[in-house]
Image (cartoon, rainbow, N blue to C red):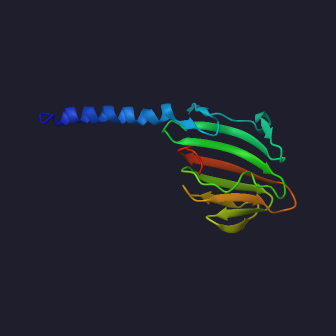
Amino acid sequence: MSDLNRRDLCLALSSLAALGGATPVLQAKSIAYGQVDPVLGTSRVIPYAQLAVEKDANGIETRKVMSGAVKTGEFLEIHETTLPPGQMPHPPHRHLNSEILFIQQGTLEYLNDGKPEPVSPGGIIFTASNVLHGIKNTGDTPAIYIVVSIGRKLKET
């Protein structure tokens, strides 16, 4: 190893970088969907009418837009939720990935590390990694918001 010259070192580092860069993409896993995610490497238009609607027992509707690893290795998940008045999509939680919510319609209360904050249409919520958070529809009409989740998708706590 002591006879390694600059050329050999550059080749070795390039090879390691190439292997290291590919590994997260190939092994990206979504706990939420329980499967290895595809590499999101194709640009496309996704017509709203083609998004499947999932409805739970509380009347919460979710339209999954995409879930997978982008070519640079980060996990990306996007969905739209319609939340009936008085409902929460799930209890407050925390996770390693960061989230951005774009509020389209309705009035929400955002639980930001234990502190409630009101959010109205046009508002944007950013949740940093590992911060306890949750939302509740505090209005009289359904709330609609789009979630963009980025980072590592690991088990929620």
Q: Position of residue 84 (x, y in %)?
A: 84, 53
Indicate the quadrant containing the N terminus: top left, top right, bottom left or bottom right.
Answer: top left
Which quarter of the picture shows residue 115?
A: bottom right
Residue that appears at 64% across and 59% down = 133
Q: Nearer the viewer, residue 19 or 95?
A: 95
How many numbered badges does the structure rendering display?
0
* Residue 102: quarter of image: bottom right
Q: Nearer the viewer, residue 32 or 151?
A: 32
Q: Residue furthest front?
A: 157
Q: Which percent across, then down, holds residue 135?
A: 72, 58
- Taking the image as shown, residue 150 lies to the left or right of residue 55, namely left
Q: Quadrant of residue 103?
A: bottom right
Q: What percent of the width, then of the height, locates residue 111?
A: 67, 63
Q: Position of residue 55 (x, y in %)?
A: 81, 41
Residue 87 or residue 71, whichever sits in front: 87
Q: Residue at x 81, y 59 (%)?
A: 106
Residue in the image at 64% along x and 66% along y: 114
Q: Is residue 153 left or right of residue 8?
A: right
Residue at 73%, 46% in the rendered image: 80
Q: Residue furthest left?
A: 3
Instruction: State whether residue 3 is above or below residue 155.
Output: above
